[in-house]
Image (spheres, rainbow, N blue to C red):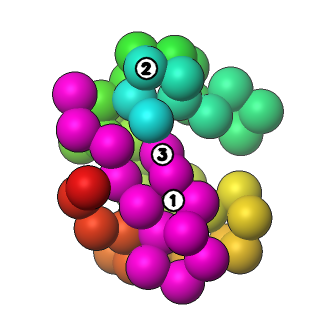
Amino acid sequence: MAKWVCDVCGYVYDPEVGDPDNGVAAGTAWEDVPEEWVCPLCGVGKDQFSEM
């Protein structure tokens, strides 16, 4: 699975790790991350991420 990087702060979303602190379980593909999810570091939406 591809990783995604925040264009604003550089946070990397790794599907193998997910974001369990914010309700996204490990193994969650980017396409399955809820649209209302935001970057845990800077708060921007999914539209501000680019595939690595």
Q: Is residue 22 positioned above or below 46 on the image? A: above
Question: In the image, residue 31 lies at what x, y percent?
Answer: 24, 42
Q: Are marks 1 and 2 in contact (CB under 8 Å)?
A: no
Question: In the image, residue 35 lies at what x, y percent?
Answer: 40, 56
**Of the residues shown, which amino acid type is indicated by label 2?**
Glu
- Identify the residue at horizontal 54%, vertical 23% (top origin): 17
Which mark, by number, is residue 36?
1
3D distance between C-alphas at marks 1 and 3: 15 Å
Q: Which image quarter holds the C terminus?
A: bottom left
Residue matched to label 3: 13
Q: Quadrant of residue 11?
A: bottom right
- Mark 1 / mark 3, whichever is N-terminal: 3
3D distance between C-alphas at marks 1 and 2: 20 Å
3D distance between C-alphas at marks 3 and 2: 9 Å
- Identify the residue at horizontal 77%, vertical 33% (top origin): 21
Q: Nearer the viewer, residue 28 or 16?
A: 16
- Identify the residue at horizontal 43%, vertical 20% (top origin): 16
Judge from the rendering whether residue 32 lies leftward or rightward of residue 20; answer left or right. Answer: left
Q: Is residue 10 visible in this depiction of the protein?
A: yes
Query: Magenta residues?
Result: 1-13
Q: Quadrant of residue 14?
A: top left
**Quick one: SS at disc 2?**
loop
Which mark, by number, is residue 16?
2
Question: In the image, residue 22 lies at what x, y percent?
Answer: 71, 39
